[in-house]
Amino acid sequence: MALLSNTNFSHAVQSGRKKLALFLVVPAVLCIGGSLTLVARMHTTRALAAETKAASAEPVAIFHATQGDATEDLVLPAQLQAYDESPVYARVNGYVAKWFTDIGTHVRAGQLLAVIDSPQVDQQLVQARASVNQAKANLSLANVTTKRYQDLIGSNSVSQQELDNNLQNQAVQNASLQSATAQVAWLEQEQSYEKIVAPFDGVITERRTDIGDLVNAGNGGAGTEMFSVSRISTMRIFVAVPEAYSEQIRDRMSVKIELTALPGQFFSGTVTRTDNAINPQSRTLLVEVDVPNPSGKLMPGAYAQVHFALPSPVRPLTVPSGTILFQAAGPQVAVVNSRNQIELRKVGLGRDLGGTMEITSGISAQDEIVANPPDFLVDGMPASIQHAN
């Protein structure tokens, strides 16, 4: 009896579980089916709306692309340099007695910059001048003696040997005078180096000396110069032009220079020379540009951008930036064809000019381009032209 009761209870439990599972599964299946039906209807509705939209004529405004510049503006970075820049060193040993120009001073060629006190050179010059006077006196005595011996040789009062000795002494004294005179000229030149002068017209960009400083003659390396002078009436710029543009660079070509410190202001320059060689590491051509700077507004070391106006192999078309559709297929432009249908054409982009964009391929100047096209435009959609520019 107990066994029979347990069996009936087990069947009752299993039957209850099946009913519960059926009760839970059926609503779930109905929900899933309803969801699928709803999604299908939504897709159908959207497809129908898209077909309806495509079937209806889309009102569009059209315009024609304009021709871009026949030249390409190649912009390259560069740094301004003074046309001439020279350190000024001492040519004589001594102490700085005075200096007359500081940084920023505009100087002329030969203008006095500083004076060096060199007592050794001064004393050597005094000694050399005394030697000249001594040599002159010795030569004068030799001349008188030689003339006297020449007068006496006729009467055999002196021997020929004595006359020859005096002639030889006269030549020696003459050579001594020339040597002493040359020594004086050399020391006078050394003494002139006590005055430090500007090598050319320019501006003082560095002063590295002061009164009392000990200076040595010659170039002792960086940091030993007394002054640095730059000629800024003309500025020099060296530009590395990529190899792809090297054949378009010509001597006497006009360029424009724009400074970072003076945005919007352009200065005219001229290509003066190139190195006529492509650097194998950078694949560039070194180009020198000279820029007149009569006002001194351009300063050495300033960062600049050099604009080369190069002939463009393909003259691009320009369109407003809002005309271009950026989609998965790439940049496209919507065009209305002869059947008043929309055509989406893939285009090649050139330079971004801000409000406009250059188009290098994909459209022509005769195409009727849709202005500000909406994203839902598709190929073959009817178009209703509202107005043309």
Image (cartoon, rainbow, N blue to C red):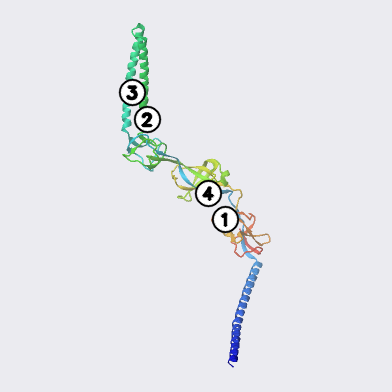
Question: Which circle's residue, 2 or 3, is located before the other in the chain?
Answer: 3
Question: Which circle's residue, 4 or 1, is located before the other in the chain?
Answer: 4
Amino acid type, mark 3: Val
Residue that numbered label 2 is attached to: 189
1 and 2 marks in contact (CB < 8 Å): no
The residue at the point 61 percent across, 79 percent down is: 29
Viewer-side residue, 166 vs 20: 20
User: Which disc number belongs to residue 357?
Assistant: 1
4 and 3 marks in contact (CB < 8 Å): no
Amino acid type, mark 2: Gln
Q: How many numbered callouts?
A: 4
User: Which disc number belongs to residue 132?
Assistant: 3
| Mark 4 or 2, closer to the camera | 2
User: Which disc number belongs to residue 75?
Assistant: 4
Question: Which circle's residue, 4 or 2, is located before the other in the chain?
Answer: 4
Q: Residue 280 location in percent, x, y?
A: 54, 44
Q: Residue 54 location in percent, x, y?
A: 65, 67
